[in-house]
């Protein structure tokens, strides 16, 4: 019940103690009948060249309902389904078999609404057996499956992003005669110095005729490690695991696997693999695990290079509570190459914090004796998910002098090391979308996330951002109401431009915001001094009157701090851009400038222009152009004497819009 309760609270569902099928997996085949009695078979559709999207959901799932009613899949089905380009099929898979027909139709007790009405693509109820085959772990799970049976967990993305997946070259169906393709490396991933490692790869036939031979090479850069001539009889979309042979690597190596024989399509002829060289190890190995709240999911083993397990702990054997520490000591029987493998049955490793628990850890080390550390073989801190991980160890009687990382601040600090070997790695944010991402971080540190809105003013993540106005670019559409804001951020330090020496910032004297369009309304900002690591908000709104690119300059004078005193480095300008796009739709309104209701951004006159004046034909000041009576009938000039009204151009005894139109009609003509 542990994750079931947590996941239901977030409208998710954990189906079984297993992980989702990873991207690149072969989709399991299925046959099922939809609620209208029509039978469907996945592989038959794929063999017809169709691409397939599966939306696994449950009627009670809030996020499922939100995405289902967003219209994304309906749009895809309309554009690319049977009545569109006919390249795509979509299935709604209700995968919680405890729900009812009433729930599906929106009248039951475990439902978010009516899932049937308005859904044009097939609905398959009681699809739990299919969800299990796909190792489903939560709702909604959305897969895109290509004709070659390879799946991608596409998730809750836009229609355009879905189309980019199933219309990519890699998702095309078989169309040429000879097209061998490499799916992925399946060989060994760890090895010891001087020890051979088995190399293998999955080969698929994407040709329309049976594949009978091809040549596959393993390349270390431009150097050919080995070459293998495969032969067989592989039908279209058939897969063979090809044993390429063995190779010896002197260091951890990333390599490519290439089809080098000629074929009709070379875009799928390459894959990649890597072999990690085992860590040197003493004969005594220590496995230390701190658990999250689900220790029963953990298992591990140490095996020799022949695959014989010399020590193991099976799933369910670890019993305890979160934070408990378990230690095992293992004496490897003889010098040689060994592999430590750890598995998590649920597929999330010891990353318990995402479920409200703590992150566990697993550290494998080797020791000269129980008091003297020799080397670190594997070090996992619980910061990411895994289903299975492996590390190699080359066991021998190591000399007692240990060369390793000697910096206590490093991730891989070895307190027993006597000689620094340059291997130290340091903590850093490991999330690429964070503002303080460190690409070569050796272990996880706190990540900072930031949105460039006034709501985030004061957020600690600004400390990792340079002085400027953010965001650099915003978009709006001609004639559509826009509401936007920028943040002026002053960093804590700045390079003095003439010397490039970095100094602390004293303050920024903010003096202006230039370039805002004249249609901008409710403009709000507060000029003045902005201190280091401070932010100020600029907001505006309005209806863009025409397309174009506006450059808006935030200007002022920047002062650095030298011995605590302000020193000006001159006027600074921080540009941002407001891009007004052309409106693809006509904007209806009154386009006549002299009308009282002229709409400055209108592009299509809708006949709504209002011209006030006297609308009574019997009145002396009747205006035939006026279409709204302004109560002026009988007022103004009389017909006698007309000479008193010098601007009465048409002589009707009253000065009104008609006279103005007559004047504009003659404007610019020469008088005879």
Image (spheres, helix red, strand yellow):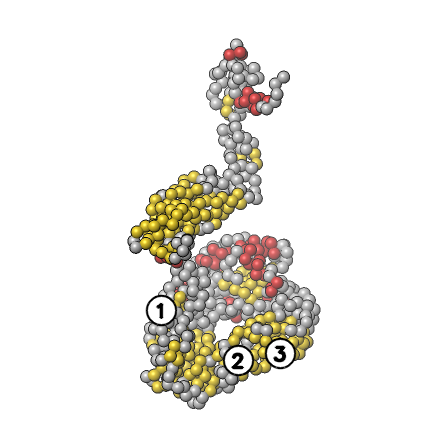
User: Vertically, is 594 above or below 79?
Assistant: above
- Can you tell which quarter of the image residue 146 is in? bottom right
Q: Earlier in the sequence, mark 3 or mark 1?
A: 3
Comparing 109 with 470, the one in front is 470
Q: Please give the residue where the numbered disc 1 appears in the rendered image.
A: 358
In screen coordinates, is 63 left or right of 199? left
- Which residue lies under the disc numbered 3? 227
Say which of marks 2 and 3 sits in front. Answer: 2
Q: Residues within 10 Å of mark 2 (few under 14, many from 20)?
A: some
User: Is residue 300 found left or right of 640 in the rendered image?
Assistant: left
| In this rendering, the label closer to the viewer, 3 or 1 | 3
Q: State the CA–CA distance, disc 2 to disc 3.
A: 16 Å
Q: Position of residue 518 (x, y in %)?
A: 46, 38
Query: What is the C-alpha distance between the residues marked 3 and 1?
Result: 48 Å
> Which residue position is annotated with label 2?
249
On-image quarter of the C terminus: top right
Q: Are marks 3 and 1 in contact (CB under 8 Å)?
A: no
Number of disc labels: 3
Kindly state the secondary structure of the residue where label 3 is placed. Answer: strand
Quadrant showing the N terminus: bottom left
Q: Earlier in the sequence, mark 2 or mark 3?
A: 3
Under circle 2, the secondary element is: loop
Residue at image position (57%, 73%) is: 221
SS under mark 1: loop
Residue 552, image x, y percentages: 46, 44
Q: How far is the residue under mark 2 from the one under mark 1?
A: 39 Å
């Amino acid at each position: 019940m542990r994750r079931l309760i947590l996941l239901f609270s977030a409208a998710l569902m954990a189906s079984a103690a297993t992980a989702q099928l990873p991207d690149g997996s072969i989709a399991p085949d299925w046959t099922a009948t939809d609620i209208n009695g029509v039978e469907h078979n996945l592989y038959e559709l794929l063999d017809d060249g169709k691409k397939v999207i599966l939306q696994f959901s449950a009627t009670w799932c809030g996020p499922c309902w939100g995405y289902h009613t967003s219209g994304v899949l309906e749009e895809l089905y309309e554009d690319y389904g049977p009545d569109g380009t006919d390249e795509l099929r979509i299935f709604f898979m209700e995968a919680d078999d405890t729900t009812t027909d009433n729930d599906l139709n929106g009248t039951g007790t475990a439902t978010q609404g009516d899932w049937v009405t308005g859904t044009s693509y097939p609905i398959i109820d009681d699809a739990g057996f299919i969800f299990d085959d796909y190792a489903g772990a939560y709702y909604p799970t959305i897969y895109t499956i290509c004709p070659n049976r390879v799946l991608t967990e596409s998730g809750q993305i836009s229609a355009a992003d879905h189309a980019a997946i199933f219309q990519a070259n890699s998702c095309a169906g078989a169309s040429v005669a000879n097209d061998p393709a490499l799916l992925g490396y399946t060989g060994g991933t760890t090895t010891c110095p001087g020890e051979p490692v088995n190399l293998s790869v999955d080969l698929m036939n994407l040709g329309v005729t049976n594949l009978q031979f091809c040549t596959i090479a393993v390349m270390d850069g431009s150097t050919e490690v080995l070459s293998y001539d495969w032969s067989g009889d592989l039908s279209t979309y058939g897969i063979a695991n090809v044993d390429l042979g063995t190779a010896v690597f002197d260091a951890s190596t990333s390599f490519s696997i290439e089809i080098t024989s000629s074929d009709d399509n070379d875009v799928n002829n390459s894959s990649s693999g890597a072999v990690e060289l085992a860590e040197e190890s003493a004969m005594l190995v220590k496995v230390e695990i701190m658990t999250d709240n689900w220790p029963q999911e953990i298992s591990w083993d140490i095996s020799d290079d022949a695959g014989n397990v010399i020590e193991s702990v099976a799933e369910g054997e670890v019993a305890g509570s979160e934070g408990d520490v378990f230690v095992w000591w293992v004496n490897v029987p003889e010098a040689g190459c060994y592999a430590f493998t750890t598995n998590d049955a649920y597929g999330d490793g010891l990353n318990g914090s995402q479920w409200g628990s703590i992150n566990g850890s697993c550290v494998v080390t080797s020791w000269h004796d129980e008091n003297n550390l020799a080397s670190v073989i594997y070090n996992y801190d619980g910061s990411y998910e895994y289903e299975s991980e492996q590390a190699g160890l080359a066991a021998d009687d190591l000399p007692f002098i240990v060369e390793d990382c000697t910096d206590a601040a490093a991730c891989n600090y070895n307190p027993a090391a006597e000689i620094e070997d340059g291997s130290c790695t340091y903590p850093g944010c490991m999330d690429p979308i964070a503002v303080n991402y460190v690409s070569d971080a050796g272990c996880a540190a706190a990540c900072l996330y930031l949105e460039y809105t006034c709501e985030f003013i004061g957020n600690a993540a600004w400390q990792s951002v340079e002085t400027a106005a953010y965001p650099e670019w915003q978009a709006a559409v001609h004639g559509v109401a826009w509401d936007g804001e920028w943040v002026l951020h002053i960093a804590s330090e700045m390079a003095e431009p003439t010397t490039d020496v970095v100094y602390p910032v004293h303050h920024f004297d903010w003096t202006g915001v230039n370039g805002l369009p004249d249609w901008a309304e409710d403009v709000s900002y507060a000029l003045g001094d902005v201190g280091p690591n401070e932010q100020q908000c600029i907001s505006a709104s309005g209806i863009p009157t025409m397309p174009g690119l506006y450059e808006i300059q935030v200007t002022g004078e920047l002062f650095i701090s030298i011995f605590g005193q302000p020193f000006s480095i001159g006027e600074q300008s921080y540009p941002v851009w407001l891009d007004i796009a052309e409106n693809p739709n006509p904007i209806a309104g009154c386009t006549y400038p002299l009308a009282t209701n002229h709409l400055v951004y209108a592009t299509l006159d809708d006949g709504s222009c209002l011209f006030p004046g006297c609308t009574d034909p019997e009145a002396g000041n009747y205006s035939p152009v006026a279409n709204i009576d302004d109560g002026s009938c009988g007022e103004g000039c009389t017909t006698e004497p007309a000479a008193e009204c010098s601007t009465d151009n048409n002589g009707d005894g009253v000065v009104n819009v008609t006279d103005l139109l007559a004047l504009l009609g003659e404007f610019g003509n020469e008088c005879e």
